[in-house]
C-alpha cells in the first residue's frame, strides 16, 4: 500500500510518498512559488537524482497535477500509475476543539476545517486548497487529515484556559491549543520504544526546537501542557517569533510606534526572536558561529534562547511532578551540541547529568546523551512528522 503525504501551504506544496509495506520513502519533493509564472518543482525519487522543473503553476490543483505527473514520469517516476496511490494524508495545522485524533476527510470534516479559518488564517485555507486539489485530480481516493493540535487536546482546563474574560473563550474559543503535536507524539513514542519502557508509565518533557519551537509535558503518553498557545507565537523564543512576553508590550508598542494590528503581529512573528536580538540571523548555526567570533549580540540571543528552553523544562518538570525522560528534537534540538549542553548544565537539580562525549552526536540517529548515572534519560530523537501522517492515514484507511 502506498500513501502520499501532503503539506500544503499558501504558495507551496511539500510531498512524500511512502510504501507502507516496508515503510520506505519512494519519493519526496516540493512545489514552491505557486501563483507565479516561475514556480519550481523539486522532485527527489529514491535511488535516482533530483529533478527541478520551472513552469507556470497558478493554483494548487495544477501543483498537485504536476506532482502526480512526476510520480508516474517515465524517467523520474516511481509508480506505473496514479492508481497505485491508495490514500493521501494531509498535515492540517489547526483542528480546534473538534479533533483530538486524525480523521478521514468527509464533507462534515471539511466544514469544520473551514470553521477554523479564523483561528489559523495563514494555514487552514491553504490545507483546504490541498484537499480540494487532490480531490480534483484523484477523485474519491481516501484522504485523511492529521492535525498539529490534536495530540494536545488531552490537556486539562487548568493548562489550556487563559485567565481572561470568559466570553472570549465561550464566544471565540480563545484558549491554548498547542502545535507540533504530531512531532511531540512521535518522539515520545520513539523514546518509550528506545528505552524499552511502557509509555503509560513515563513522565516525558519533549523540546521541539527548530525554527519554530515548543515544549510539551507528556504524562503516560498524553500531553498535559505545551508552550504554544492560541497561535504558535507563545512560549519559547524562536527563529523570528518572540515567544512569551507581557501582553501589555503589544498595546504599549502600538501606541509608541504608531503600529497597526497587522504591523505589530508581523513584528512579533517575523521580526523578533533570534533574528531581532542577534541583528544577524534567525538560524542557530549562524548565531553560534558569530558567537564563537566574539559577537556579543549573538551571544545574548543564544543565552536567551537556551535560558527559555531551560525554564520551560523546569516548569514542565513541576507540571509532571518529576521527569523521567527529556527529549531534544527538530533542527536545533537534533543538531546543536552546545545548546543541549547549555540547557542541561542548568538542570542538575533535577538529576540531569549530560555525558559530554555522548552529546557530540551526529545527525539523524536516536541516542541517549545522558550519563549512566543520570536520574533523567536525556535523548536526541529525530522527529518525523511525515511518517506519523502516513501511519495515521494507513491505519484509518485500513480500518
Ligand atoms: P522548522 O521549525 O522550520 O521545521 P527545523 O526543525 O528544520 O525548522 O529547524 C531549522 C533550524 O534548525 C534552522 O533554522 C537552524 O537554526 C537549526 N539548525 C539546523 N542545523 C543546525 C546545526 N547543525 N546547528 C545548530 N542549529 C541547526
Image (cartoon, helix red, strand yellow):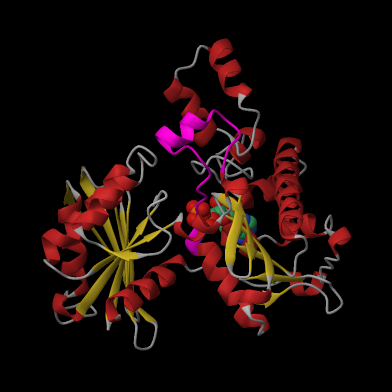
Can residue 380 be seen in the rendering of this structure? yes
- Magenta residue span: 161-182
**In the shown orientation, is residue 144 left or right of residue 139?**
right
Query: Residue 259: within the magenta?
Result: no
Residue 381 coordinates in the image, percent (x, y)? 61, 71
Q: In this view, does 233 lie above or below 224?
A: above
Towards the viewer: 64 or 245: 245
Residue at the bottom extreme of this rendering = 22
Towards the viewer: 108 or 367: 108
Can residue 76 be seen in the rendering of this structure? no
Residue drawn at (51%, 44%) of the image = 232
**In the shown orientation, is residue 145 left or right of residue 255?**
left
Residue drawn at (50%, 52%) of the image = 179
Residue 341 coordinates in the image, percent (x, y)? 78, 60
Query: Residue 168: within the magenta?
Result: yes
Residue 248 coordinates in the image, percent (x, y)? 62, 22
Q: Quadrant of the N terminus?
A: bottom left
Q: How many marks?
A: 0
Q: Quadrant of ligand 1?
A: bottom right
Amino acid at each position: 500500500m502506498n500513501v502520499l503525504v501532503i503539506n500544503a501551504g499558501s504558495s507551496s506544496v511539500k510531498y512524500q510518498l511512502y510504501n507502507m509495506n516496508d515503510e520506505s520513502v519512494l519519493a519526496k519533493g516540493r512545489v514552491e512559488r505557486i501563483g507565479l509564472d516561475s514556480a519550481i518543482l523539486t522532485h527527489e525519487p529514491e535511488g535516482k537524482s533530483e529533478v527541478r522543473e520551472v513552469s507556470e503553476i497558478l493554483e494548487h490543483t495544477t501543483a498537485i497535477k504536476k506532482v502526480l505527473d512526476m510520480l508516474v514520469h517515465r524517467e523520474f517516476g516511481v509508480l506505473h500509475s496514479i492508481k497505485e496511490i491508495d490514500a493521501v494524508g494531509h498535515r492540517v495545522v489547526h483542528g480546534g476543539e473538534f479533533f483530538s485524533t486524525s480523521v478521514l476527510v468527509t464533507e462534515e470534516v471539511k466544514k469544520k476545517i473551514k470553521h477554523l479559518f479564523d483561528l489559523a488564517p495563514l494555514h487552514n485555507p491553504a490545507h483546504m486548497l490541498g484537499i480540494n486539489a487532490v480531490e480534483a485530480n484523484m477523485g474519491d481516493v481516501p484522504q485523511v487529515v492529521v492535525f498539529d493540535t490534536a495530540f494536545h487536546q488531552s490537556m486539562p482546563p487548568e493548562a489550556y484556559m487563559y485567565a481572561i474574560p470568559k466570553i472570549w473563550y465561550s464566544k471565540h474559543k480563545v484558549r491554548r491549543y498547542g502545535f507540533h503535536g504530531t512531532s511531540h507524539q512521535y518522539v515520545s513514542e520513539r523514546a518509550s520504544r528506545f528505552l524499552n519502557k511502557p509509555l503509560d508509565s513515563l513522565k516525558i518533557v519533549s523540546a521541539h526546537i527548530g525554527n519554530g519551537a515548543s515544549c510539551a509535558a507528556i504524562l503516560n503518553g498524553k500531553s498535559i501542557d505545551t508552550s504554544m498557545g492560541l497561535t504558535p507565537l507563545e512560549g519559547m523564543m524562536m527563529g523570528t517569533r518572540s515567544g512569551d512576553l507581557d501582553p501589555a508590550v503589544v498595546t504599549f508598542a502600538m501606541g509608541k510606534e504608531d503600529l497597526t494590528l497587522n504591523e505589530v503581529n508581523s513584528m512579533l512573528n517575523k521580526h523578533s526572536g533570534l533574528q531581532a536580538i542577534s541583528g544577524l540571523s534567525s538560524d542557530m548555526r549562524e548565531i553560534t558561529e558569530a558567537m564563537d567570533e566574539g559577537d556579543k549580540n549573538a551571544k545574548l540571543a543564544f543565552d536567551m534562547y537556551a535560558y527559555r528552553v531551560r525554564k520551560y523544562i523546569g516548569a514542565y518538570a513541576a507540571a509532571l511532578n518529576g521527569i523521567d525522560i527529556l527529549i531534544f528534537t527538530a533542527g536545533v534540538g537534533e543538531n546543536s551540541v552546545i545548546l543541549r549542553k547549555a540547557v542541561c548544565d542548568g538542570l542538575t537539580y533535577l538529576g540531569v547529568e549530560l555525558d559530554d562525549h555522548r552529546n557530540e552526536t551526529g545527525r539523524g540517529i536516536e541516542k541517549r546523551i545522558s550519563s549512566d548515572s543520570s536520574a533523567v534519560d536525556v535523548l536526541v530523537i529525530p522527529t518525523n512528522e511525515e511518517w506519523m501522517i502516513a501511519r495515521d492515514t494507513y491505519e484509518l484507511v485500513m480500518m
